[in-house]
């Protein structure tokens, strides 16, 4: 049942969460309002108790008596739970081409939603410092902030990951003797909605390129061979753009946004009712004038947009060879045929 796979999802989420708080500074000013220092607040991964222990302990090296310097931040991933609210169909798959090779297609089941719990701890010696840091964080969470992470790099599957601020706790160790160091701690707890993907599989040879639907009626138990209706409907995907860079002619005049007649150096290689591509615009040929080497076209077909095309631009003809190269997610047309008879 279980085969090895690893997408590094937990690592990506942990790094993405910590990166949010990488560029927080405290600017200290003198009595005249002039900036005297600009301190970047360090952030490390680990539990709060670890850093508090380092703050309180005596330094082992007396030649380097410095302990942890405050203010600082730490964060920790400390829990995970299933997110039933965002449940997706368990048996549904989606397909995508490999980022490294767009001729190959991978399939993967829909991801499983989970909630990851994080804590962000802000530690400082004075209230002014901890307020300074907290005020740079809270305005972005109302109550969620969304980041985009490439969870499945193999096929470039990017997901928006909402990070929700749930609670804020304040701890101020102001009691104690004069030898104790004061530490103010603000603990911000977050929920991160993420997704876990299963293994991907090669689906290059499994794409459906032709569909056939048969309909038989009129046969009886006594005469099963003589059906009065026997029809098969076949549909095949047809490319709407050139994937082979099959340039068969060139423009001899500029083409404006609204023009429906284009002039070429040669129209012979272009059949009537075929599809051509100029730049990124697809067009349908509806009339040919071989004497003037002109084509009457339907502009901006198959969700493409009108554009201006200049004299000398190549005209690409969409052929059957392009049908084999249709990419997942691209628009395509359908070439249909009916085979059979009706009595």
Image (spheres, rainbow, N blue to C red):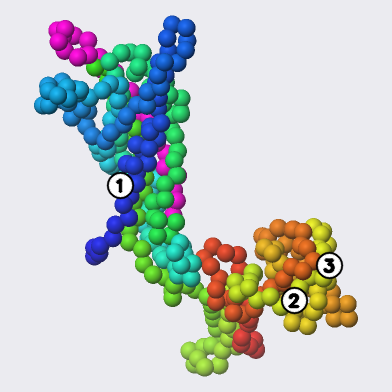
Up the image or down, 169 lies above or below 9; here it is above
Residue 10 is labelled as 1
Q: Is residue 253 left or right of residue 20?
A: right
- The magenta stretch is 157-182
Up the image or down, 233 lies above or below 148; here it is below
Q: Position of residue 324 (x, y in %)?
A: 55, 77
**Residue nearest the viewer, comparing 201 with 237:** 201
Hey, which quadrant is residue 59 in on the image?
Answer: top left
**SS at mark 1 in the image:** helix
Hey, which quadrant is residue 63 in on the image?
Answer: top left
Q: Is residue 319 magenta?
A: no
Q: Neighbour class for label 1 at 10 Å: few (<14), some, many (≥20)?
A: some
Q: Which residue is mark 2?
A: 249
**SS at mark 3 in the image:** loop
**Residue nearest the viewer, comparing 2 with 84:** 2
Circle 1 or circle 3, nearest the eye: 3
Q: Is residue 5 left or right of residue 227?
A: left
Magenta stretch: dominant secondary structure: strand
Residue, x 60% and y 71% (percent of image)? Answer: 243
Q: Is residue 177 magenta?
A: yes
Q: Is residue 17 left or right of residue 316?
A: left
Residue, x 52% and y 88% (percent of image)? Answer: 220
Q: CA distance from mark 3 to mark 2?
A: 12 Å
**SS at mark 2 in the image:** strand
Residue, x 88% and y 77% (percent of image)? Answer: 292
- Does residue 297 appear in this view? no
- Does residue 311 appear in this view? yes
Up the image or down, 145 lies above or below 296; here it is above
Q: CA distance from mark 1 to mark 3?
A: 57 Å
**Residue nearest the viewer, comparing 218 with 195:** 195
Residue 253 is labelled as 3
């Amino acid at each position: 049942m279980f085969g090895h796979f690893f997408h590094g999802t937990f690592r990506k989420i942990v790094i993405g969460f910590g990166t949010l708080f990488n560029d927080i500074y405290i600017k200290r000013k003198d009595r005249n309002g002039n900036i005297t220092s600009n301190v970047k607040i360090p952030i490390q991964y680990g539990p709060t108790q670890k850093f508090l222990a380092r703050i309180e302990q005596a330094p082992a090296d007396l030649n380097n008596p410095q302990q942890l310097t405050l203010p600082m931040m730490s964060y920790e991933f400390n829990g995970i739970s299933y997110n039933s609210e965002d449940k997706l169909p368990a048996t549904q798959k989606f397909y995508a081409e490999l980022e490294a090779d767009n001729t190959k297609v991978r399939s993967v089941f829909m991801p499983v939603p989970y909630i990851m719990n994080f804590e962000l701890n802000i530690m400082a010696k004075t209230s002014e410092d901890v307020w300074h840091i907290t005020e740079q964080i809270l305005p972005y969470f109302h109550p969620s902030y969304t980041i985009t992470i490439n969870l499945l790099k193999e096929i470039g599957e990017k997901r928006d990951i909402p990070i929700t601020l749930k609670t804020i706790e304040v701890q101020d160790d102001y009691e104690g003797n004069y030898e104790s160091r004061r530490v103010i701690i603000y603990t911000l707890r977050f929920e991160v909605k993420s997704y876990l993907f299963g293994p991907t599989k090669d689906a290059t040879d499994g794409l459906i390129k032709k569909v056939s639907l048969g309909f038989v009626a009129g046969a009886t138990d006594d005469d099963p061979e003589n059906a009065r209706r026997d029809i098969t409907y076949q549909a095949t995907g047809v490319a709407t753009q050139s994937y082979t860079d099959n340039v068969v002619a060139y423009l001899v005049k500029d083409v404006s946004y609204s023009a429906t007649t284009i002039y070429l150096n040669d129209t012979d290689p272009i059949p009537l009712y075929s599809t051509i591509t100029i730049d990124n615009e697809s067009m349908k040929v509806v009339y040919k004038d071989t004497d003037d080497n002109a084509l009457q076209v339907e502009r901006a077909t198959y969700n493409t947009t009108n554009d201006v095309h200049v004299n000398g631009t190549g005209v690409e003809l969409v052929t059957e060879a392009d049908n084999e190269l249709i990419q997942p997610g691209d628009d395509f047309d359908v070439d249909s045929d009916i085979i059979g008879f009706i009595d």
